[in-house]
Amino acid sequence: MEETKSVVLITGGAGFIGSNLCEYFLGKGYKVVCLDNFATGHRHNLKDFLNHPEFTLIEGDIRNAAVCATSVKGVDYVLHQAALGSVPRSIKDPVTTNEVNVSGFLNMLTAAKEEKVKRFIYAASSSTYGDSEALPKVEEVIGKPLSPYAITKYVNELYAEIFSRTYGIETIGLRYFNVFGPKQDPNGAYAAVIPKFVMQLMQLESPKINGDGNYSRDFTYIENVIQMNELAMLTKDPEAINTVYNVAFGDRNTLNDLVGYLKQFLAEYDQRIAAVEVEYGPNRAGDIPHSLASIDKAKTLLGYDPKYSMQEGLKAAINWYWNTLK
């Protein structure tokens, strides 16, 4: 098949989502180019395929236009995952967040346009829904952003739309909802909630919830995200391109629910974890109270069919964390 010879550039390929995408597409017979500056990604995420004959690593920064231009040479598809994540990080340092997420994004989009890549698929964010209280979140109804990070991700969507209209490059934005799974970093000030809580519970430490634990999220396992990236890359339907999609399971759980499941599943490895108490602190600035995705658009236009509920994903992720971090 012709598709198996395609070259895929994955920016941020040493990160959590990016490295999972690298591994998946190598397994499917693609040539994979990974671009990363290792600001938040890790070399150990690449160790299983670093020497794969179809894998190329480019160490560089998307803020450098020349690096972007080099990385897209001969590339068919770009899966743009590189970004500085985290709402709190963006509140603390909005300038760097903007430089990476907006200027870096624009550099990659421009390079892809110049190289005439087939399609540019990029990581958008559920933070774009901002202060809209409507549930479930539908792609066409957004509110005002609540953080610098959210602004940058919305600007990505605006640039992608303009580039599609003006230059004819095909783009698809994927609004990720609270993705979790293997290779997600539990360490650091801006660690995501699930790996952070798993690490704390494994060490019999109390996880700290911001607020009363009733904020809810559409927690989305990495395998569902991989499926959406592949569908976005391969769709031939003109109706399905030059737009954005929610990437989620389409169900929501509170943070209290989450901790309950984590304790239950981890207790199968160590019974003492079931008795660990939870601590509560103040709400975090910029956090959206409730998040639930409508995935109807992705189902209709792309044939999206998420296989992993939060609970199923948690079991798989916990198995990985237990065997990797213990």
Image (cartoon, rainbow, N blue to C red):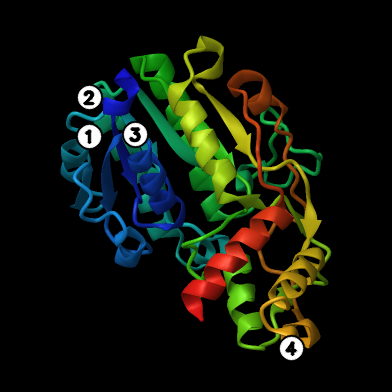
**In front of the other: label 2 or label 4?**
4
Locate residue 55 relative to residue 279 in the image: left or right: left
Amino acid type, mark 2? Glu
Q: Which residue is mark 1?
A: 72
Residue 114 got which mark?
2
Label 3 residue SS? strand
Could you tell me if the residues under marks 3 and 1 are in contact, i.e. CB atoms within 8 Å?
Answer: yes
Mark 4 lies on residue = 272
In percent of width and height, residue 219 lies at 68, 53
| Cα distance between the residues tagged 2 and 4 | 57 Å
Between 310 and 11, the one nearer to me in the picture: 310
Q: Nearer the viewer, mark 3 or mark 4?
A: 4
Residue contact at pointers 2 and 1, CB within 8 angstroms: yes
Please, what secondary structure does the residue beneath circle 4 have?
helix
Q: x, y percentage for residue 193?
A: 62, 67
Dot 3 amino acid type: Val
* Disc 2 crowd, CA 10 A, few/some/many (<14, 14-19, 20+): some
Q: Nearer the viewer, mark 4 or mark 1?
A: 4
Q: Is residue 39 visible?
A: yes
Under circle 1, the secondary element is: loop
